[in-house]
Image (cartoon, grey):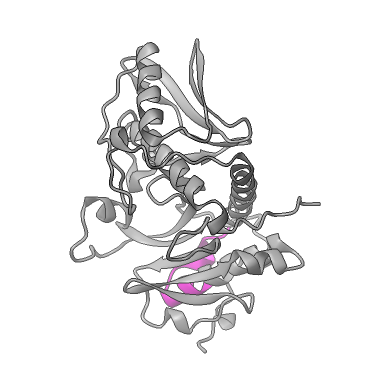
Amino acid sequence: MEHTLPGLPWASWSQTKDTLHLWTQIVGKIQLGTTAPRNHWWHTTLHVTESGFATGRMTSGGTSFSIAFDLAGHRLVVRTAGAEKTIPLRDGLSVAEFYRTLLALLRDLGISVEIKAEPFGVPMTTPFAEDTEHASYDPERVEEFRRALEWADGTLREFQSWFCGKSSPVQLYWHSFDLATARFSGRPAPVREGAGPVESEAYSHEVISAGWWAGDPSSPEPAFYSYTHPEPGDLVKRPLSPDGAFWAPAGTTHQARLDWSEVLASGDPRDTVLDFLQSAYAAGAVTAGWPYDELHTSWCPPRGIVDPSAVAGS
């Protein structure tokens, strides 16, 4: 039986979340500068672990190393082949102190890295070395986030196991602090007018993405989401499951959304989320004309096989 999922109200840990997000951006930027590029920026992402989340293996000056947020033990762990060093994660540890301490620790291990030491894609703009404002860490709220993140990761992994086409791992994106996975049709996508290099690489091919975020000021409730790129014109006419799921405007496009409160209130949270993810994928795949019959694995359950007759416009 699954453990009880936490409510994770954004207001109860917003300051802690902002601090943890900025710490994560520092680590993500270190990974960006110490790994070989991969398509869709997949070399920069983090992955969920049994105790939090971590980078992959990085290399600097011939030294291989990794960095992990051990949220169960409330510490940052830097490992090489012959050493392990930690930074306790605590209330009062500012972004500036975290940044200085981590870079000094890396230097002690013979690792030299250079990053653009400022936030990316978030409202906060203070350079890391100067940010003494963000210094909140509530261990109880962090543990609730860790549990929710671990559960969402497992559910997204199960959903992705039904698909045999090109797909991404389930990844934690440090710029937006959301957990996501992507399925691809195999066809290139048109370049979006005005897109910069980050967006152009990320959306170079037709994709249906699915993920989970923990909330922010504009959408304070945690939620699962999905979107199709490029978005077909009548996508939002397609039905979603369960009844509480909905299409939400997202700039000039839309996202399928399932609020965390709907998941918590359901009799079977995992089945509820899987139904939602499948309904959003089917809506996008059918409407965009994907070869969906060719894209399910041999062990895909019947619920994961697209039935176009069920994706009728409303």
User: Count the marks: how many?
Assistant: 0
Q: Residue 48, position in %: x, y?
A: 55, 41
- Which residue extends farthest left? 194
Task: Decide which of 95, 207 is in the foreground and name it.
Answer: 95
Residue farthest to the right? 1
Q: Report which quarter residue 7 is drawn in.
A: bottom right
Q: Is residue 89 visible?
A: yes
Q: Residue at x 61, y 64 (%)?
A: 260
Q: Quadrant of residue 115?
A: top left
Residue 108, placed above or below residue 256: above
Which residue sits at x=57%, y=42%? 138
In the image, what residue occupies the spot 55% across and 78% down?
Answer: 308
Residue drawn at point x = 41 percent, y = 30 percent: 98
User: Where's residue 186, x and y in %?
Assistant: 39, 58
Viewer can see residue 169: no
Query: Is residue 6 rendered magenta in the image?
Result: no
Q: Name the one closer to the observer, 105 or 179.
A: 105
The segment highlighted magenta reads 282-296
Asked if the magenta segment contains residue 286, the reply would be yes
247 vs 202, left or right, is: right
Q: Is residue 196 above or below residue 37?
A: below
Most extreme residue toward the bottom is 314
The percent position of residue 174, horizontal first and vertical second, equals: 41, 44
The image quarter containing residue 245 is bottom right
Return the x and y of residue 171 as percentages of the image width and height: 48, 46
Q: Main secondary structure of the magenta part?
A: helix
Q: State left or right for residue 104 relative to residue 193.
A: right
Q: Is residue 299 above or below residue 314?
A: above
